[in-house]
Image (cartoon, rainbow, N blue to C red):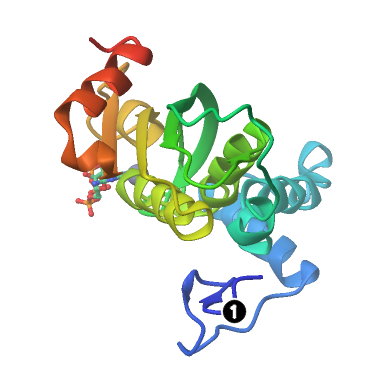
Amino acid sequence: MDARVNPLNNQPANSKQPRRPNQEEAEAAVRTLIAWAGDDPTREGLLETPGRVTRAYGEFFAGYEQDAKTILSKTFKEVGGYDDIVLVKDIPFSSHCEHHMVPFVGKAHIAYLPHDGVVGLSKLARLVDVFARRLQTQENLTAQIIDAINEHLGPRGAAVMLEAEHMCMSMRGVHAHGAATVTHRFTGVFAEDRVEQDRFFAMIGKR
Ligand SMILES: Nc1nc2c(ncn2[C@@H]2O[C@H](COP(=O)(O)OP(=O)(O)OP(=O)(O)O)[C@@H](O)[C@H]2O)c(=O)[nH]1
Ligand SMILES: [Zn+2]
């Protein structure tokens, strides 16, 4: 666990921690929402729903129990001197916007220029999951992914792009079905050198 972050609220560890409700309280909250929506939480079809919803929430928000450092801790140095871009593109992710607690779903593209060894490719997808499985904004998710890569891998440069559809913009509110939100962030060589940025865009098929 990252000691500087309170896993319950994603705030600095010295911030006031809310008490974590127990299972019974969480299920009672779901029953309240069902009744508030206008249905009867005691009817047969809904009796097991609070348990299912809390289990689902356990999966959606499992990222509060995980940390990037552990995932990126193992690197491989035997790569035949390879020191060019390593890119994993089209990593599927689903997260929940912190404003409406509704999903946003899309793909992440992550590249870095290795400095001292490479990380297992699956770990980049796991890294996305650590932060996606929390209440998020897309901007914050983008920043947290690249910050973790820089902090734990110390690459010569990193690039992260996220493309996602926000259900709070399609299923409700403005009803902008199919609108895509794109965020990207470059650091190190990717931030300093337009040629490297262009190579990144070309490799993910955006040029
Ligand atoms: N910047 C940013 N905005 C987001 C993200 N996810 C949702 N939002 C926006 O958060 C905003 C919240 O706006 P509010 O006016 O407080 O809430 P609202 O009345 O539900 O807004 P509408 O969605 O316009 O109906 C909306 O414009 C959402 O589109 C995100 O990841 N990043
Ligand atoms: Zn939203």
- Residue 32: percent from left, percent from top: 61, 60
| Residue pictured at 37% horizontal, 36% vertical | 160
| Residue pictured at 34% horizontal, 32% vertical | 161
Q: Amino acid at mark 1?
A: Ala
Disc 1 C-beta below 8 A from ligand 1: no
Does residue 63 appear left or right of residue 159 in this picture?
Answer: right
Q: How many marks?
A: 1
Ligand 2 sits in which quadrant? top left
Image: 199 above or below 162: above
Name the residue furthest front. 81
Q: Residues within 10 Å of mark 1 (few under 14, many from 20)?
A: few
| Label 1 secondary element | loop
- Residue 21: percent from left, percent from top: 68, 75
Does residue 206 appear left or right of residue 93 in this picture?
Answer: left
**Is residue 70 in view from this perspective?**
yes
- Residue 148: percent from left, percent from top: 48, 55
Give the residue number, with chain letter if any, for mark 1.
3
- Residue 135: percent from left, percent from top: 48, 54
**Is residue 107 in view from this perspective?**
no
Does residue 160 appear left or right of residue 184 in this picture?
Answer: right
Q: Nearer the viewer, residue 59 or 139?
A: 139
| Residue pictured at 28% horizontal, 29% vertical | 181
